[in-house]
Amino acid sequence: MTENLLDVSSFEALPPRLVLHLRADLDRVTAELLRELDGPPSERVRERLMSGLSHFTDLVEDPRGAWSRIAPWYQDLGRRLAREGRVPEEVHHGLRQTGRAVWRSVKGVLESLDIDRATIGRLAEAQFSYMDAVAAAVRQGYEAEGEATPEAIDRRRSALLSLLLSPDAEETAITEAAGCAGWTVPRTVAVAVLSPRDPAHQPARPLPEGMLVDWGRTRPRVLLPDPDGPGRGRTLEPLLEHWTVVLGLTVPPAAAGESHRWAQRTLLLVERGVVPDDGLVRCSDHVPTLVMFGAKSLLDTMAPTRLAPLEGLPPIQRERLIETLLSLLAHNFNATEAGRRMHLHPQTVRYRFRQLEKLFGADLTDPRRCLEMEMILRTRGSGALTP
């Protein structure tokens, strides 16, 4: 992780005897630099200057062995910067000071040593290489610490949720993104869609660990792992005070987008009053309704033909017969149950049924025709049944 941050070849080309002179000047050069600072230096600044000078001389003395010990020090510095809410660029000023200090120290000994111009050039290369490697190590530690912050984890989990809900999500990509987000891929998932009951009040309540949440939408999305497990559905109940919550179908993770689409379709039916908003709304409890409304255009096309016998009737009579027919279809032509639903005497229901028999004839004894009529009536509503 650290070896490739520094090209040690320029350090290996330096004469080892240079180290003694550099070390001898550390205290003096550091003191000079500290005096140049505005205001009294902190212990942290003093430590970093001394460490930077010492690390450079360590590399001159032992290029390959020293860097493996030095790099973690700067990576830890980067992590501290991230924890303190500071930026890696703060280190650059210190690096420039250290570079000036090294050259001050070198200038004092160049005349006493037999050092040629080529060696001086390699020393400059070593200095620049060292500064680049230190900056990279600091950045490395900074980013590693930043990846562990709650904000960074939230960003990666939000990206994971978007991937899961995309139409072309692949298991390999999901597994990789889940690993980066620290999320265990479950066996099954379901996606819930939320709609605010009061647009002016939309609290983002914290949800249990493991759920993936996207609050940044008009209709937030929540991915629930293993939704059919014991008590899993109840984890969404605290949201019901301020949200209409519709839970999609249970599917494998790669098909989460399909669960999301069914939840969205069901929410539309809730908002239209077709599906009751009574607690947590589960798509799995409304499959026939979803199927009917999924084929609404087909049913609308069939309606004039299937409901043709009702043409020509006075509006009030037509509405009464439609209500009775729908209730009879729903209760398998049991007049008592249908009457209880409509708050009518069974005899009244039987009288209307005889009228329907005259109008529809054999269609009322054909299960397929009855199913078609029930689907048409349920999707169109009694108020929209005028042929």
Image (tube, helix red, strand yellow):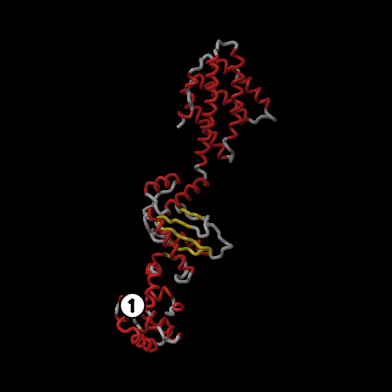
Residue, far right: 39
Residue 293 at x, y = what percent? 41, 69
Q: How many marks?
A: 1
Q: Amino acid at mark 1?
A: Cys
Residue 288 sits above or below residue 312 on the image: above
Name the foreground residue: 60 vs 174. Answer: 174
Name the foreground residue: 110 vs 82. Answer: 110
The residue carrying mark 1 is 370
| Number of residues whose C-alpha sits closer than 10 Å to that of mark 1, classed few (under 14), some (14–19) or many (20 or more) | some
Name the foreground residue: 336 vs 216. Answer: 216
Helix or strand or loop: what does disc 1 sit on? helix
Residue 109 sits above or below residue 174 on the image: above
Residue that appears at 34% across and 75% down: 371
Residue 52 at x, y = what percent? 57, 26
Residue 353 at x, y = what percent? 36, 86
Residue 11 at x, y = what percent? 50, 20
Name the foreground residue: 184 vs 359. Answer: 359
Relative to 80, is 276 on the left or the right? Answer: left
Residue that appears at 42% across and 79% down: 387
Relative to 320, is 363 on the left or the right? Answer: left
Which quadrant holds residue 87?
Answer: top right
Relative to 135, is 45 on the left or the right? Answer: right
Which quadrant holds residue 231?
Answer: bottom left
